[in-house]
Amino acid sequence: MSETQVLTTAAGELRPTDDLAKVAGALKFFRVMAVIAGVALLILCVELILHYGFHNEALAWWSPIHGLLFMAFMASVVNLGTKLRWTWLRMGGYICTAFVPVLSFWLERKVNTGVSALLADAGA
């Protein structure tokens, strides 16, 4: 990427002044949190089935932990999104994927593919 070139793809936008190492770090944090959020949501689904279907409180402790993990996932989306200049609407949509079981796994692959290609084009 040259000194004045702005690199824009569907994955986001990078400018010559952007620290590519920070973007790569934000991508790694996002990937980890997307997988953790997906697993946490699946465990929450099991907890809800146990609670409402079988009146079993074995996983009643999981809901607050899931909430904290969801907040960390939201932070990872905003962190990566601000570095890639995503719109707030896009970030909100990505956060909403954590409400549908297994959708965050799909999102992680989609974002990783696009942002990795963007970083490769930028010379990272």
Image (cartoon, rainbow, N blue to C red):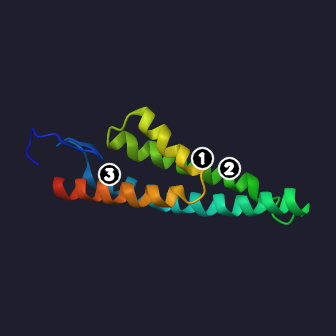
Q: Give residue 71's mark.
A: 1
For label 1, the crowd category at 10 Å Cα-Cα, with few meaning under 14, some 14 to 19 and many 20 or more, is some
- Name the residue rendered at 28%, 45% in the picture: 10
Q: CA distance from mark 2 to mark 3?
A: 26 Å
Residue sitting at 11 percent across and 40 percent down? 5
Q: Nearer the viewer, residue 49 or 115?
A: 49
Q: Position of residue 6 (x, y in %)?
A: 16, 39
Mark 3 touches mark 1? (CB < 8 Å): no
Q: Which type of secondary structure does the marked residue at label 3 adopt?
A: helix
- Circle 2 residue: 67
Mark 2 → mark 1, Cα distance in angstroms: 6 Å
Farthest bottom residue?
58
Q: Is residue 83 above or below residue 47?
A: above
Mark in front: 2 vs 3: 2
Task: State the image coordinates of residue 47 (x, y, percent, origin top left).
Answer: 78, 61
Residue 95 screen position, x and y as percent: 52, 44
Where in the figure is residue 89, as x and y percent of width and height? 44, 33
Name the amino acid type tagged 3. Answer: Val
User: Can I make out residue 51 in this image?
Assistant: yes
Q: Residue under label 3, please give it.
A: 23
Q: Could you tell me which residue is drawn at 78 percent across and 57 percent down?
A: 48
Q: Pointers 2 and 1 in contact (CB under 8 A)?
A: yes
**Tag 1 or tag 3, which sits nearer the N-term?**
3
Q: Nearer the viewer, residue 61 or 17?
A: 61
- Local SS, label 2: helix
Q: Earlier in the sequence, mark 2 or mark 3?
A: 3
